Image (cartoon, helix red, strand yellow):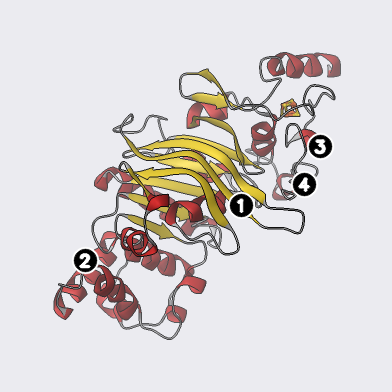
Amino acid sequence: MSRQGVAPGAGEPVLQLEGVEVRFPSPHGSFAVVDRLSLSVTRGEILGVVGESGCGKSMLARSIVGLVPPPGRTVGGAILFDGVDLVRLSPDERRRIRGDAIAVVPQEPMTSLNPTLRIGDQLTEVLRAHRPEMSRSQRRARALEVMEQVGIQFAGQRLAQYPHELSGGIRQRVMIAMALICGAVKLLIADEPTTALDVTIQAQILELFVRLQSEEQMTVILITHDLAVVAQTAHRVAVMYAGCIVELAPVLDLFDAPLHPYTRGLLETLPRRGASASKSHLATIAGAVPDLARPPAGCRFFNRCPHALAGICDAALPALEPVADERWVRCHRWRELPAVAAAAVGAAS
Ligand code: SF4
């Protein structure tokens, strides 16, 4: 399932974020959890968005679909979907697009599925809302079709079951079926879709995303804290830290030559081939994501970065700079860092 780092149809943007800002109020004034973020996602691309929890990934997803929880709000920028600015649409217009052309797959299906309703009723409810012209039998036929598409066996039987009667993997497939049921999805946003699943089922669900992207030419934004997940599925990766993108690169480039110290830190937390489970379990990035209500003046990774230089790194927030084709990084010292790393290895040997 490894990706080549090139999205089919690359170049034709489906989604363009321009200076998107999500803010929450606080006693000291409002603060940004997504800070003037710009990004373009192309047709048929799987974009991985990675970072620790609290870095703004899920809030970015919620901003795209218009579901930032109050009192938070998307206060600035544009979210262009097929050229239409979603930020300027009415709540009703956004609701019509959400669940139809843009769909979301959540992290934990149990909290998104209604435990008191049969699976069939929950699937057909989406069609009732978005395809009122369909008859009852057409809705049922479409539910069966989409369940088979996402690999749910005994689909007829499943329609009559309740969520608690299904395994975690099948519940997640039901959520994906629900996202696809209208048959018009252009952009699928999956927020930690495999976190609650065991490794084998996780691999099957990721396989499914890759198949859907390739069969349907769907654009997928895959949000995860786990770089191993994007390694298997994404064409391109945006690494987020403290509300900002700190590195953006094709997946192979990111894994071969990460430029930002935070990306390197995340890669070091991945279990090494051959390492025992207990050793790989110990790898973490020391320190914590800064309090976004009082962000540092300079680089937001300053207090955790092994290469931080006082007077340079803490003087101003670095800009997200283009460094090569399709590669961007937000670090004052990215040009020197390979040399810094080599010198450290030399001194230690
Ligand atoms: S700007 Fe400085 S502190 Fe921030 S990531 Fe780069 S080297 Fe580290």
Give coordinates of residue 179: x percent, y percent.
34, 61
Q: Are marks 1 and 4 in contact (CB under 8 Å)?
A: no
Q: Amino acid at mark 1?
A: Arg
Seen in the picture, residue 319 relative to 18 is either above or below; the reply is above
3D distance between C-alphas at marks 4 and 2: 50 Å
> 335 left or right of 255?
right
Give coordinates of residue 157: x percent, y percent.
29, 80
> 315 left or right of 329?
right
Seen in the picture, residue 138 relative to 273 is either above or below; the reply is below
Q: Residue furthest bottom?
A: 116
Label 1: how many Cα within 10 Å (few below 14, some 14–19, many 20+): many
Label 3: how many Cα within 10 Å (few below 14, some 14–19, many 20+): some
- Per the rendering, the mark at residue 23 is 1
Res 28 → quadrant: bottom right
Q: Element under label 1?
A: strand
Label 4: how many Cα within 10 Å (few below 14, some 14–19, many 20+): few
User: Mark 3 or mark 2, which has the lower sequence index?
Assistant: 2
Label 2: how many Cα within 10 Å (few below 14, some 14–19, many 20+): some
What residue is pinned by disc 3? 303
What residue is pinned by disc 2? 145
Q: Are marks 4 and 2 in contact (CB under 8 Å)?
A: no
Beta carbon of the mark 4 residue lies under 8 A of ligand 1: no
Mark 3 or 1: the one toward you: 1
Mark 3 or 2: the one toward you: 3
What residue is pinned by disc 4? 294
Give the camera-side residue of 329 and 68. Answer: 68
